[in-house]
Amino acid sequence: MLQQLKRHNYITPTHFLELSKGYRVILTEKRTELGNGRDKLANGLAKLVEARDGVEVMSVELEKKKVVCAQSQKDCENLLVEIVSERRVADEQRKQVEGDSERIGKEEIECKAIADDAEAELNVALPALQKAMAEVEKLDKSAISEIKAYKSPPKQVETVLAAVMILFGNKTDWTTAKKVLGEANFLQSIKGYDKDNVSATIMKKIKGYVSHADFKPEAVGAVSKAAGALCTWVHAIYIYASVAKEVAPKRARLKGAQESLAVKQASLQKAQEELAEVTAKVNRLKQKYDDSVGEKNRLRAEADQMELLLDRADKLVKGLAGENERWRASIGQLQNEIGRSLGDALVAAAFLSYAGPFDTQYRSNLVGGWLSAVREQQLPSTENFTFASFCALPTDVRQWNIQGLPADNFSTENGAISVRCSRWPLMIDPQNQANKWVRKMEESQLHIVDLKSKDMLRKIENGIVYGLPVLLQDVLEELDPALEPVLAKALIKVGNREVLRLGDKELDYNKETFSVCREAFIFGRYLKGSISFS
């Protein structure tokens, strides 16, 4: 290289240490990456098998659900036939009950009319009877004793007692009357007299008394109050019995009508209860039918949904049937790559540590020599190994190209070195391509400084503390000594902290996102210090 390009390249122990450390890191990362890819494909195959088994299970379940749906449909049809039959019976009973209810309602009206007519006629006699009974209530033993005290009673008193004796069916002489008056329950007999069953013979005899001009309660009461009260009672019994005699046929007819009505009402009540039972049965059947229809619809919906899912799953399984073999082949390929990563990672780590300053031809010769050495040691490796394809994903390379990195293999290798190397990269950039790419890649978060910037140290300090990328451009052969700890990544462990010294400050190091890119516009010049070229 010195003879052809007039350039020096220094190999230091640091390079070897980076090789050793980088090999472990790259091997772990690559095996993890390939293992994840293999596991995803294996999981995919397992899911395919699971889906295929699931399709078979769903097919069996679908057939069972179809049988259940068919039975449910048949049950619903049988229930519907039963409901129609029971509803027909209920409708017939309802019509009969409604007809009977209408007829009985008319008979109730007729009975009420007869009762009202009889009641109206009786109401004519009742006031007189009630008045007489009020007068009788006033009688006591002393009043009766007053009448009994007569040895020869006045004519009006004798006539009244004769009428009373006729009503009780006794002789009308004074001796008999006096004897009856002496009975202890005489007043109770008067008050409890059976006024509804006075015979026609008695009524005929009494008529001769009550029609007499002197047989008046006022006239008799002037002679004897007790006799006047009994006179009022006799008049009231006569009037009531006369009315009751006329009302009796109506009462008999009313009684017969009420008895007939009671029988019919009992029959109607029984028919109504039977109708209620039939109606309740129809309602229960209807509810059962509605439940059965709901269950049938639910089963049908489940069967349709299962059939849809089964169809989709079957299409998916059949569509991915070809992927099955491809995924199996890919798993085997990834497994082989995991085995070959043992040698490939070693060559990649060597490339990162040593190949940066060289051009394409030198890099190709170096990789060829390293691969030969790896194979001599019987380490597995890829036949056509390329650093760019091993250390950079195609998606990352495409994104770099979009951000301005040239698409040639040499630039791709330089991009991979810049991203994957453990030390900050020094970019020899005569055409300003790396500068544009770094600016585009980091965008607004990038701090751009040069050795002439007054705030250079402050921006680098912010980048260290807050984890921001820094582009140190236009570097020369000599650098500010304050930058040496930063560029050398001379980390100091203080407890659980990692700090970087910048000048006289010790700054907490944000190792997640902080990075430094050094960029120079010189080419083919002798550069001092440990550098990584890309």
Image: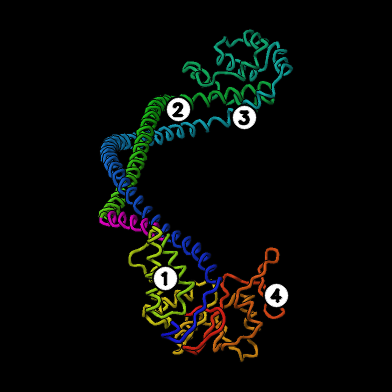
Tell me which numbered mark, 3 or 2, is placed earlier along the sequence. 3
The amino acid marked with disc number 2 is Val
Task: Identify the secondary structure beneath mark 2.
Answer: helix
Task: Identify the secondary structure beneath mark 1.
Answer: loop
Asked whether 184 or 528 is in front, the reply is 528
Of helix, strand and loop, which mostly describes the magenta segment? Answer: helix
Q: Are marks 4 and 1 in contact (CB under 8 Å)?
A: no
The Cα atoms of the two marked residues, 3 and 1, are separated by 129 Å
Residue 3, relative to residue 274: is it above or below?
Answer: below
Task: Identify the secondary structure beneath mark 4.
Answer: strand
The amino acid marked with disc number 4 is Glu
Q: Do the residues labelled 1 and 2 touch (CB within 8 Å)?
A: no
Q: Do the residues labelled 4 and 3 touch (CB within 8 Å)?
A: no
Asked whether 447 or 420 is in front, the reply is 420
Asked whether 319 or 246 is in front, the reply is 319
On screen, residue 445 versus residue 188, left or right, reads: left
Q: Residue at x 33, y 67 (%)?
A: 384
Per the image, the residue denoted by label 2 is 247
x then y, percent, for residue 65: 30, 42
The amino acid marked with disc number 3 is Lys
Per the image, the residue denoted by label 3 is 131
